[in-house]
Image (spheres, rainbow, N blue to C red):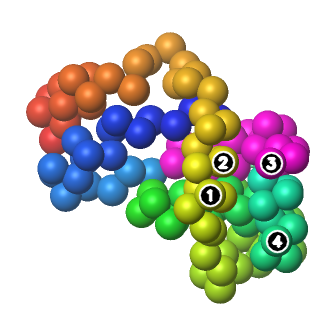
Amino acid sequence: MAQQNDIQPVLAEHDTKMMAWGPLGGQGAEGVIKSPVLAEIGAQYNKSAAQVALRWLTQRGIVAIPKSTHKERMEQNFKIFDFRLSGADMQAIAALNQQDAGFVNFHDPQFVKYLIETYG
Ligand SMILES: NC(=O)c1ccc[n+]([C@@H]2O[C@H](COP(=O)([O-])OP(=O)(O)OC[C@H]3O[C@@H](n4cnc5c(N)ncnc54)[C@H](OP(=O)(O)O)[C@@H]3O)[C@@H](O)[C@H]2O)c1
């Protein structure tokens, strides 16, 4: 899970919302769904690790559109608006940041400014 925390303020300057590329960790979703940290946090609220991940994103104002081929998971993924993660929960999840954004450095605010200015 790579978090691009420096980018959100730059997007806010342009009244633009950040969107999760793979809100559950992307195709396969091994890391996020299997995270014991998310599972432990979810147990406090009777929620799954996936629900905790989606709540963590939406609570930070990040758009999350998870994909699932299972109807029950689709339904589960909508049920994230009836609980609120604590500050300690939010910090514990933030600490899972793997700093891996792939071949382009999306962590660089200057690169994001370049994209906005070039492509609108
Ligand atoms: N336009 C673009 O450039 C672009 C790029 C990347 C992604 N996207 C889109 O963004 C969306 C999300 O991307 P993504 O599919 O890579 O990643 P994702 O939504 O983060 O993860 C999807 C994976 O999570 C599993 N999953 C979903 N809900 C779950 C739950 N409640 N519990 C356990 N596992 C769950 C899915 O398995 P099952 O299907 O087996 O349930 C699938 O393996 C997709 O609609 C994708 O098409 C678009």
The quarter of the rendered structure image containing the C terminus is top left
Q: Which residue is mark 2?
A: 92
Tell me the SS state at disc 2: helix
- Under mark 2, the amino acid is Ala
Q: Which residues are magenta?
A: 20-37
Kindly report which numbered mark, 1 or 3, lies closer to the viewer in this rendering: 1
* Disc 3 C-beta below 8 A from ligand 1: no
The amino acid pointed to by label 4 is Gln
Which residue is at the far front? Answer: 88
Quarter of the image for the N terminus: give it: top right
> Are the residues tagged 2 and 3 within 8 Å (C-beta)?
yes
Residue located beneath label 3 in the image: 37
Residue 87 sits above or below residue 28 on the image = below
Amino acid type of the residue tagged 1 in the rendering: Ala
Q: Are marks 2 and 1 in contact (CB under 8 Å)?
A: yes
CA gap, disc 2 and disc 1: 6 Å
Mark 1 vs mark 4, foreground winner is 1
